[in-house]
Image (spheres, grey):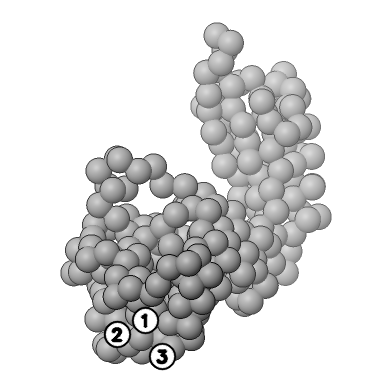
Amino acid sequence: MSESRIYTAALIVIGDEILSGRTHDKNIAQIASWLGVQGIRLREVRVVPDVTEAIVEAVNALRVRNDYLFTTGGIGPTHDDITVDAIAEALGVPVVIHEEARAILEAYYTGKGSTLTEARLRMARVPEGADLIPNRYSGAPGIRWGNIYIMAGVPMITAGMLDALTGSLEGGAPVLSATLGCWVGESEVADLLGNTEKAFAGVQIGSYPFFREGKTGVNFVIRSTDAGELTACTSQLAQDLAALGHPAIEGGI
């Protein structure tokens, strides 16, 4: 397999409601999946409270060691939506009203027979120098500043913003995957998995054990950016499992 540039991203999930358990995060999975299609690997995720110092520290730590940094949550109209202010502080720039965002919001609320109040205008505030990420659902745009993408916390709105960004980020080859399921104890095939991964450079094998129907099983997820290597590794692993008396099921169990 030829060497290629690996692009990485980090995600900061912002919100006391996530940390308290009142809200179950869905954005990690959908952002990770979307990034994989863009050829970008999600390397780390932090969940932080609605505290300026925590957001600033996380932003400055993660934006410098990844190609991209995404944040979700805390960009609404209320007093506790402090993400924009905290990120501006991390960047050392002021917060300003983005005139295009103001116009978008004004048109959105006028179209609903309402007005752009001071609270709603908060959603036009951005770190100075930022660009906008379209939001087809609620009018309020997301924000891009350099390699930082500031997005909504509501999963449906986040999905729309991701859709608007599709194809615009530089990435490497998308990560492909295949799954094999097997009724076997994970420890029984640990050596086989390690040896197989060593034999196929650039391929990663994850094992995910489960207990079902009174039996122990494992799903093996094989990942690679090279379709040929992925197919060869999957085929070899299936053959080796069968040789040990543990036939594999394509697609998993």
The answer to whether any part of residue 11 appears in the image is no
Tell me which residue sits at (74%, 27%) in the image. 249
Is 81 drawn above or below residue 194 in the view shown?
below
Residue 221 or residue 96, whichever sits in front: 96
Mark 2 secondary-structure assignment: strand
Q: Mark 1 is on which residue type?
A: Val
Kindly identify which residue carries mark 3.
Answer: 129
Mark 3 secondary-structure assignment: loop
- Give the residue at the far top of this rendering: 214
The answer to whether any part of residue 249 appears in the image is yes
Tell me which residue sits at (35%, 76%) in the image. 121
Q: Mark 2 is on which residue type?
A: Val
Residue 231 or residue 146, whichever sits in front: 146
Q: Mark 3 is on which residue type?
A: Gly
Question: Which corner quadrant holds the C terminus?
Answer: top right
Give the image quarter of residue 48: bottom left
Kindly identify which residue carries mark 1.
Answer: 126
- Give the residue at the far front of this rendering: 113
| C-alpha distance separating marks 3 and 1 | 8 Å
Kindly identify which residue carries mark 2.
Answer: 95
Give the image quarter of residue 219: top right
For the residues bearing labels 1 and 2, Cβ distance under 8 angstroms = yes
| C-alpha distance separating marks 3 and 2 | 9 Å
Earlier in the chain: of badge 3 and badge 2, it is: 2
The 10 Å Cα crowd at callout 1, few under 14, some 14 to 19, many 20 or more, is many
Residue 168 or residue 65, whichever sits in front: 168
Rendering coords of residue 162 (x, y %): 57, 64
Tell me which residue sits at (26%, 69%) in the image. 82
